[in-house]
Image (cartoon, rainbow, N blue to C red):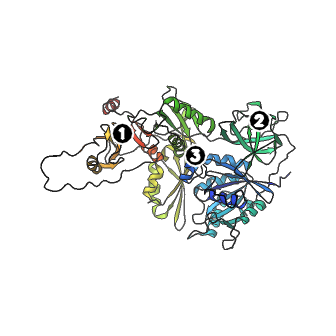
Amino acid sequence: MKQENIRNVAIIAHVDHGKTTLVDRLLWASHVFRDNQQVEERVLDSNDQERERGITILSKNISIMYKDVKINIIDTPGHADFGGEVERVLNMADGALLIVDAYEGPKPQTRFVLSHALERGLRIVVVVNKIDRPNADPEGAVDKVFDLMVELGATDEQLDFPVVYASAVNGYARLAPDDDTMDMVPLLDTILAEVPCPDVDPTAPLALQVSTVDHSSYEGRIGVGRLHSGTIHEKEQVLVVKADGDARTAQIRKVYTFENLGKAEVPEATAGDIVAVIGIEDADIGDIITDPENPQTLDPIAVEEPTMAIVFEASTSPLVGREGDIVGARQLKERLLREKESNISMRINELEDKSGIEVAGRGVLHLSVLMETMRREGFEFQVGRPRVVYKVEDGQKLEPIEEATVDVPNDYAGKAIEVMGTAGGIMEDMASDESMTHLTFRIPTRGTMGLKTRILNATHGEAVLFHHFKEYGPYSGEMVGRKNGGMIAMSTGKAVAYALDTLQERGRLFVGPGDECYEGMIVGESAKEGDMVVNVEKSKNLGNQRSSSADKAIQLTPPITFTLEEALEYIEDDELVEVTPQSIRLRKRLLSATDRKKAAKR
């Protein structure tokens, strides 16, 4: 039975191709907001980091009504570190809007997500966005999407995809680039016409599969998924079948459907709709909620394994407590265990020796988003170098291997290949056209640390790098770390311009005049190998004679400032990143030079 009044659509795109802005325009077009209502841009990017970074971190469900049809829209992250979430939510959709920049065309992340959408047989509607850009080539972008679909093995039916041309910023969608339409109606009409309605049986036994897990401090875990068959009622007794086959009964306390930007509590929901249920205490991805009398089975959902881990510890810095309010090890542990409840894509466990909490995630960005959230809450803590999560099978050590793709101008292809080679990358494919070269590598996850910065430096900022987890493979041996040593402060105090002036000739500085420093803090990078202990407090000796030549004005190069991701990728095994609400400092694990010498002798 076809549910003609429902459409389930996922929105997939590369980072920064206008996905969230397009959803804004659909919300306006369906009159979710009053005409005079003040609404922020990118209304779905609800947390501060999403707004500042301009990326979607969490998948979100909303719905709009158009011509008496409920359109469930699933906004998905565009960054690879959150790519696992995209794979899961595609289970809830019958069609997908593939948004492509009219100037850039499909990008590596587009390829990754599109291949999953085609595998699931989703109906693809291609939206060529930003057609108002200078140098936009909408027709060229469509040709590239067609070529990509052929390469990914799309069926003839999938290759016959509808195309809508849009400028999300200006709020219009068109069936041809030179139309004069100035609203979003053509896109909404295309969704109704092209995306198939759910073909389900509301009278069959209940079958609901949890695709994402939300968390409420009042209600606990909220399982979100598509109702594949049957009808679900509040207060209903159900059977919950876990991924490992374990089954137990539970009672559904509340049932919600998605309405506009929020959820609406309903007494019951029918097959084909996307629902959120409360009452399953340890709801997890892939759980099947079904009829106890007549249990149904569905294909399992694989939850991606974390590939990178980092240890959080209470700060032992001499400056601890000056910038943050929450510095205790117990509070840090409680906060991370709370995160474990709501963030099922991370694995969070206390170390056996109780020295810290290990947090494993999908990549450095995934981990740094959590750190950034915590520092904004007033936490001070320190973290070690991220390490990859190894496995041992049949006595063989395995490490995570990623597939990396680099799109680079032809002139810089050689440089990009060289950088990838030094990071342990093995080239598997190379294709080029008049201007760009597309390279595919197999690379250990260890090799991706700091790789983006090195690639951008080597290609003058022209390359686009994308990598995602592929499989576990044999351990490929040791890798060379950072070549240059660090400048280590010898005492605690404020940095002085006179001292920094002499030090900047010997390397690059990370601190400026007046910055608080302490013994063991890394204040710069030496131009040579090996660490050097330096005095950042040294001031000029003042004599009672006048100098024959006037003192030269001190000219300092601005210090290098690190983002959290850059700091994590920069440090070595014997170093830590100190994170406070106002600062990101690099330091040695052992602050005293004497202690470091003793450790080196061991």
Which of the pair 239/278 is nearer the observer?
278
Q: Is residue 197 visible?
A: yes
At a point 78% along the width and 62% down the height, the residue shown is 193
Label 2 or label 3, whichever lies nearer to me, is 2
Quarter placement of the C terminus: top left
Q: Secondary structure at mark 3?
A: strand
Secondary structure type for disc 1 = loop
Instruction: Give me the C-alpha separation between circle 1 and circle 3.
Output: 34 Å
On the image, the x and y values in percent for residue 409 come to: 49, 63
Q: Which residue is mark 2?
A: 253
Residue at left offset 43%, top offset 57%: 458
Q: Earlier in the sequence, mark 1 or mark 3?
A: 3
- Circle 1 residue: 521
Residue nearest the viewer, comparing 30 with 92: 30
Residue furthest to the front in view is 36
> Which residue lies under the disc numbered 3?
469
Q: Residues within 10 Å of mark 2 (few under 14, many from 20)?
A: some
Q: Quadrant of residue 216?
A: top right
Q: Nearer the viewer, mark 1 or mark 3?
A: 1
Disc 2, SS: loop
Amino acid type, label 1: Met
Question: What is the spatial separation of the Cα atoms under label 2 and label 3, in whole angstroms?
Answer: 37 Å
The x and y percentages for residue 135 are 56, 70
Which dot marks residue 335? none
Q: Amino acid at mark 2?
A: Arg
